[in-house]
Amino acid sequence: MNAERFQAITQSYPGLRIGVLGDFCLDRYFEIDPARQETSLETGLPVHNVVNVRAQPGGAGTIVNNLVALGIGTIFPIGFAGEDGEGFELWRALEKQPGVRLDYFVKTVQRRTFTYCKPLLLASGKPPVELNRLDLKNWTPTPLVVQELLIGRFQEVAPKLNCAVVLNQVDIPETGVVTGKVLEAVKNEMDAHPEFLVLADSRRGLRGFPPVVFKMNAVELSALTGGASELTLEQVKKAAAKVARKNGRSVFVTLAEGGILGASALGEVQHVTALPVRGEIDVVGAGDAVSANLTAAIAGGATLHEAIELANAAASVVIHKLGTTGTASVAEIANVMPPD
């Protein structure tokens, strides 16, 4: 991609209005100084002394963070948080982000705020080491009244959007935002407005999702298509192209160090290999960076190949940010883009 095309695509970002429908969580980091370790007098167990606490939006919030980093003009989160301390922190972290509008975000006493508590052991001159995580989740089905609120908010905001991202982050079906009823509402919106761009990603795979733009990894593609547990690059190309033709929408497959492959509904297949690793890496958040950048790039007029190039570069930036779920700005992406 030459500089002119890069500018043409990325300069459209401030004019975009993007919705993010999905499971928002709070990423709470506890930074531990190992030099201050003590032993509990009561239990005899080691005490990890936390010297700093920081919090940022996670899950679907990571996609929001990446869209903010890209300079997207207006971002509408559609999800829920509980009426609890974590919900307060999540709301505050979202609302202070430039361009983020919380008009369609739900606060409810019927759910607790999905939270990842991440203890990080810090040592001078070494990458942070994450200890056992503590998670706060919902284990029961999302109440119907909350689902109806989410559907109403999505239906209200959809006509205002250029595009949307749908992210399922929960492991147990029907306990988060992206329930069967919510997916039905997404399908209805797509049926009414076929030109509306929606990209979906799910940690449980995309089986049962309406025919939107699919973003997945090779294992998820294999599970969706009933292929072998490990696919060759040629098998990925054929499987992705088949799904794209069936859905009438593009399909993107992340291949770790193999980069990203995309297939269009018209039969075009593009593959861009990953950029070289430049030191220590942390892959947390790379997939969400890819989702955000693919969506923004396509909405900004990028071709299939250009969207993959931009997403690949963003992932390269993010994996080199240690001890956090990172993001990639337009300037950072430009710095790692290979010369035309």
Image: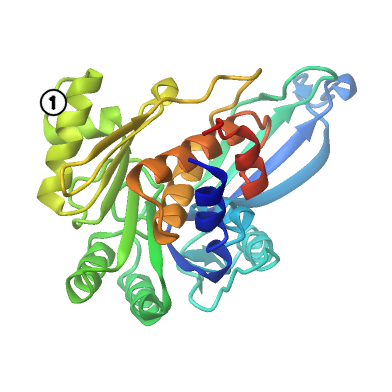
Q: Position of residue 267 (x, y in %)?
A: 16, 42
> Is residue 78 among what the camera can see?
no
Seen in the picture, residue 50 relative to 124 is either above or below; the reply is below
Q: Position of residue 166 (x, y in %)?
A: 37, 57
Q: How many marks?
A: 1
User: Left or right: where does residue 177 sit relative to residue 238?
Assistant: right
Seen in the picture, residue 307 relative to 106 is either above or below; the reply is above
In the figure, residue 239 lies in which quadrant? top left
Q: Position of residue 38 (x, y in %)?
A: 86, 22
At a point 63% along the width and 57% down the height, the residue shown is 86
At a point 29% along the width and 59% down the height, the residue shown is 179
At a point 66% along the width and 41% down the height, the residue shown is 332
Identify residue type, mark 1. Gly
Which residue corresponds to mark 1?
227
Seen in the picture, residue 41 relative to 74 is either above or below; the reply is above
| Element at label 1 | loop
Seen in the picture, residue 252 relative to 183 is either above or below; the reply is above
Extreme-right residue of the structure: 36
Q: Nearer the viewer, residue 77 or 87?
A: 77
At a point 33% along the width and 52% down the height, the residue shown is 200
User: Left or right: where does residue 54 sit relative to residue 203?
Assistant: right
Q: Nearer the viewer, residue 198 or 181?
A: 198
The colour style of the image is rainbow
In the figure, residue 304 lies in which quadrant? top left
> Is residue 121 among what the camera can see?
yes
Dot 1: few (<14), some (14–19), or many (≥20) neighbours within 10 Å? some
